[in-house]
Amino acid sequence: MAELPARELVPGDLVRLRLGNIVPGDAKLTSGEYLLTDESALTGESLPVEKHPSDQVYASSIVRQGEMKRSNNKDWHEYVLRQDHRTCRRG
């Protein structure tokens, strides 16, 4: 595996997440046992959230324990953007 700046990641890239990493973008976890992520900046939740394969991880979350691989998921980004757009139109 090579190290790349987050701005160079594209959909389909596999990324290894390890202790202390900041998740570079929303994605689906693909392999590994588990991950504890700090999502407090996004959700306000003070406790780490446990993640397993096929769970979603969110940009700017911080890995507090474990190691897993994730895949950038274009469809997930498009879904989030559509949901944000709908929320803005209603409000």
Image (cartoon, grey):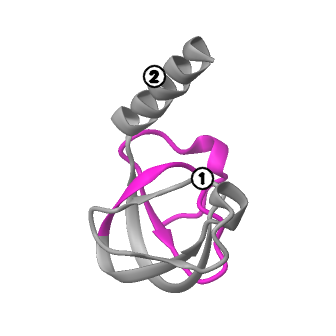
Residue 77, percent across and down?
45, 35
Q: Nearer the viewer, mark 2 or mark 1?
A: 2
Residue at image x 62%, y 65%? 39
Residue at image x 59%, y 61%? 23
Q: Which residue is mark 1?
A: 59
Q: Are marks 2 and 1 in contact (CB under 8 Å)?
A: no
Amino acid type shown at disc 2: Arg
Is 77 on the left or on the right of 42, as rendered? left
The quadrant holding residue 69 is: bottom left
Badge 1 element: loop
Q: In the displayed image of the protein, which residue is found farthest to the right? A: 41
For the residue pair 72 and 46, the one nearer the viewer reads as: 46
Residue 12, percent across and down?
35, 45
Tell me the magenta residue range. 1-30
Q: Is residue 57 magenta?
A: no
The first of marks 2 and 1 along the sequence is 1
Q: How crowded is the residue under tag 2: few (<14 C-alpha within 10 Å), some, or many (20+)? A: few
Q: Which residue is mark 2?
A: 82
- What is the spatial separation of the Cα atoms under label 2 and label 1, in whole angstroms? 17 Å
The quadrant holding residue 56 is: bottom left
Is 17 on the left or on the right of 29, as rendered? right
